[in-house]
Amino acid sequence: MTKLQVGLLFGGRSGEHEVSIRSAKAIANALSTPHNTEKYEVLPIYIQKDGLWQAGEVAQQVLESGTALVSNNSGNLWQFPSQVTQVDVWFPILHGPNGEDGTIQGLLQLMQVPFVGSGVLGSAMGMDKIAMKMAFSQAGLAQVKYMAVNRSEVWSSPCVFPKLCDQIEETLGYPCFVKPANLGSSVGIAKVRSRAELEAALDSAASYDRRIIVEAGVVAREVECAVLGNDYPKASVVGEITFNSDFYDYETKYTQGQADLLIPALLPDAIIRQIQDMALQAFKAVDAAGLGRVDFFYVEKTGEVLINEINTLPGFTATSMYPELWAATGVPFPELVDQLIQLGLERHKG
């Protein structure tokens, strides 16, 4: 039996470079199990922080060490390693901008080689929080009140900016959350409780992205559901994130012991079914494929379930929520990786 060459594409130019390396390492380990080694051979391909693609010993070294390579770009960014031609199916695990926003997916599509995960549309909508929320609204999914803001409104004349802040205060009130529309892993997000904090947060978010979203704060439990599949996706058990910090920011998310995952979440059966159903609706609303993790707020006081966002390329370390949810649903990590590759092959056939 001829083994499929899996191009494990990791690293990338976003602020989530190190997380991508950790996810790739976990996937490589999963592909080294006896069941998977019969079918697949891993071909690691590493994208440096400056955008240079590396294969062979360099990529293997980064994968094994878990440490990013110090960029020393003397090569051509558009000259791919010769090993690229050997790839039978790509497994991109590039988190954040230029990795899960449709850009790399477009390149892989042009290569005419199957790949794991959503295509250009699903990836782009899953990354841009404003487009995502518009799709959710069109699908009739309940969500927190929000406002879309452009950088031009923040970095504008002294007359326009105060009016914008007035409008946010009147529409959403405090506390509220200010987020760059196109960054992952809670980068650039701020919880604000006053006019001064709002002004500073908008200025900070504008430095990350020209599109900004401001959301009303809500007292709720944060729960997540994983989705697996293409045209007939399935939902996992529901998990809950608990943490002691003010909100689930980057430091809380990636610092050991700062947050706890409770799987399965202790919720009423009817609420679990509602979350699973909404997760599948969200997955289809943005045209996602392969995998997705959908995040929700459960307002216990009113019994409301509000959708927060979908992540079309969620963290994939051995302890990340997405694989943990599927493990609890009866799909262990190595089998999950196998299924995702098969789903990528299936979708490529059309």
Image: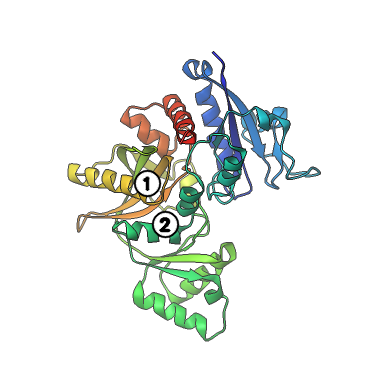
Q: Which residue is mark 2?
A: 132
Element type where label 2 sits in the image: helix
Residue that appears at 39% across and 26% down: 332
Give the amino acid at mark 2: Met
Q: How is the image coloured?
A: rainbow
Give the amino acid at mark 1: Phe
Residue that appears at 52% across and 55% down: 183
Nearest the camera: 110 or 228?
A: 110
Q: Quadrant of the C terminus?
A: top left
Q: Is residue 298 left or right of residue 177?
A: left
Q: Residues within 10 Å of mark 2 (few under 14, many from 20)?
A: many
Q: Which residue is mark 1?
A: 283
Q: Is residue 89 above or below residue 94?
A: above
Image location of residue 134, percent across then percent down = 39, 61
- The label shown at residue 336 is none
**First in residue order: circle 1 vs circle 2:** 2
Image location of residue 99, percent across then percent down = 57, 46
Instruction: Name the residue at the top extreme.
Output: 1
